[in-house]
Amino acid sequence: MTASNEELAQQLYKQKRYKEALPLLEEAANAGSAWAHGVLGWMYWYGHAVRKDKDQSLHHYQLAYDGGNESAAHPLGLSHFDAGRAELALEWFRRDRHHPISSLYWQYRTIEAHPHLARHADEADDILLAAANGGHLFAKRDVAFRMMKGHKRFGTRRQGVFLWLGLYPDLFRLARADSYDERLR
């Protein structure tokens, strides 16, 4: 695989010309490109230019991570979460350094659904607060709900209402769908 072919694959991918990029991506992945494996993992997950195949997606994401693409930890965690493998999901979310705020939220979601995975009694609450303080929209929403329900650790009901009302600028940010805003992942 030449550098110019990988560059062409990146251009085609950015232009959403997935069918044209697919053979170049497969060639790059066979040559050991962690980036290509990550893109192929994404393509198989969503079914772009290929048939949806979550097993193939996991395979490519794993190879991407093993090849040095640390950003693959997040989709690996989401894949395992979606498949009901909570322990593996939590492990991958804890490894994720590329999307720290989002990984905190997903750690919270995993522990909340499977309390036996918590390291200590209040770990889910601590993680939720850290994600909310980092600006994660859904974490802030969950904190606001807990406040309004009367959970004193998070704040008062009044504070919850104000936090809930304060989420509207974040909702506009979400509506803009800025793919580079890590707080939304």
Image: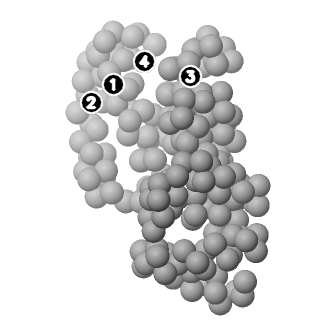
> Mark 4 = which residue?
154
- The residue at the point 63 percent across, 18 percent down is 118
Instruction: Select label 1 or label 3 by which is in front.
Output: 3
Q: Distance between the residues labelled 2 and 3?
A: 23 Å
Residue type at mark 2 is Trp
Q: Earlier in the sequence, mark 4 or mark 3?
A: 3
Q: Do the residues labelled 1 and 2 touch (CB within 8 Å)?
A: yes
* Residue 25 percent location from the top left of the image: 61, 74
Residue type at mark 3 is Ile
Instruction: Select label 4 or label 3 by which is in front.
Output: 3
**Residue at the extreme front:** 51
- Residue in front for this viewpoint, 93 or 10: 10
- Residue in front for this viewpoint, 129 or 99: 99
Q: Which of marks 1 and 3 is nearer the N terminus?
A: 3
Q: Distance between the residues labelled 4 and 2?
A: 13 Å
The disc at residue 164 is 2
Q: How far apart are marks 4 and 1 (CA)?
A: 8 Å
